[in-house]
Image (tube, rainbow, N blue to C red):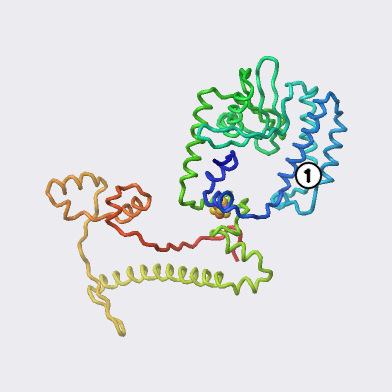
Amino acid sequence: MATYSHSRISTYENCPYQYKLRYIDKVKVDVPTTIEAFMGSMVHETLEFLYKNKKFKKRVAKNILIKFYRDLWAKNYSEDILIVKAEQEGLKADNYRKMGEKFISDYFDRMRPFEEMTILGLETMDRMTLPDGNQWHVRIDKLGCDSEGNYYVCDYKTNARMKDQEEADSDRQLALYSIWVKDKFKDAKSVKLIWHMLAFNKDAVSERTDEQLEKLQQEVIEIIKEIESATEFPRNQTALCDYCVYKEQCPSFKHEAELDKLETIEEFKEDEGVKLVDEFSEIKTKLSELKKAEDEFRDKLIQFAKQFEVDVVYGSNKKCSVKEFDKIVLPEDREKLIKVLKEKGVWEDLVTLNYMKLNSKVIKGELDKEIKDTVEIVKDFKLSLSKRKDVEEE
Ligand code: SF4
């Protein structure tokens, strides 16, 4: 039996190949800390410090809390922290430090005297057993309750996008923690899920019924079942690839990662892959230009043949026959045509096998095994050229 978490399951949902690299092959990679993550972690630690003191009846003034945050930032900040994305938006590390400071200050003013609940746990870590025997990782930023049996599962969020109600009501991570709370605290009458959206100084709140939780738990078990029985882990290229730390191992980005390591433009141009793609692309462009030219000459030859009333046009070494012929145009209402062909008993004779459809259905396993067994499956390649979005056109 394994331990699953919201992040583990999400990894599989986003890209099964990334899941394989991370959880099955256990590939070790350096995961750089981004400035956004660093700021989030400093804010979390500062608020933990606030509530820890509160638990021991020690009051922390706002200026002390801000000082704690500033000192923590100064102690932990290092030049390795990635600020690439922030820099693209003209932001510096210091902007993030100030942002975090504002989040803490606003939260402090809004929640003072911090008696919204009795704190039961801070950065709580535990595991719960799912009905299928697997473990589910529990990690709660702030867990509390009141005297009426209401429990609160709280998460601090420092991201710049407000969670709307629909998103809060469909969030899987905190919802599953409700089950853990209900199991641990038998007096729990309700479990409220609260996201402290610090950038907006607002909370997003959600609550689930027992039926909803049961359904959610079942869905999670189904995904786990799918993961555990998976034999193939396809890559899923999306915008999230930009943040993937496995690009050097991913066949879709490995070559790009190798090129990024080259120091000079000469080295880049000498790369075997670069040369092949550049030449292939050139040939494809020429072919499409030639196809266009072929169509133009075809039209011109037809015009010539019509004008001079000939059906063979002579060149130096070759001659070109230009023959007019009749052909049918299929009606828009195909069903009607098919019906007539069937009625007249000629359908079987005229119908052709739709190779593309058959191929796709067999490969996707959508057809009967008997059908699959009548064909042979071989490996082939499909090459498609597309523009590199990270490169400016010359
Ligand atoms: S780079 Fe994209 S496709 Fe490749 S493993 Fe990462 S998420 Fe998957």
User: Mark 1: which secondary structure?
Assistant: helix
At a point 36% along the width and 49% down the height, the residue shown is 365
Q: Quick check: 171 above or below 309?
A: above
At a point 55% along the width and 70% down the height, the residue shown is 273
Q: Quick check: 57 above or below 126?
A: above
Residue 187 location, x and y as percent? 63, 17
Q: Nearer the viewer, residue 44 or 186?
A: 186
Query: How many residues crowd mark 1 within 10 Å: few (<14), some (14–19), many (20+)?
Result: few
Q: Nearer the viewer, residue 169 or 180?
A: 180
Q: Nearer the viewer, residue 338 or 247?
A: 247
Residue 151 location, x and y as percent? 66, 22
Q: Residue furthest bottom?
A: 316
Q: Residue furthest top?
A: 148
Horizontal relation, residue 58 to residue 271: left or right:
right
Q: Write down the quadrant of residue 286 in the picture.
A: bottom left
Horizontal relation, residue 336 to residue 40: left or right:
left
Residue that badge 1 annotates: 95
What amino acid type should be assigned to the residue bearing mark 1?
Asn
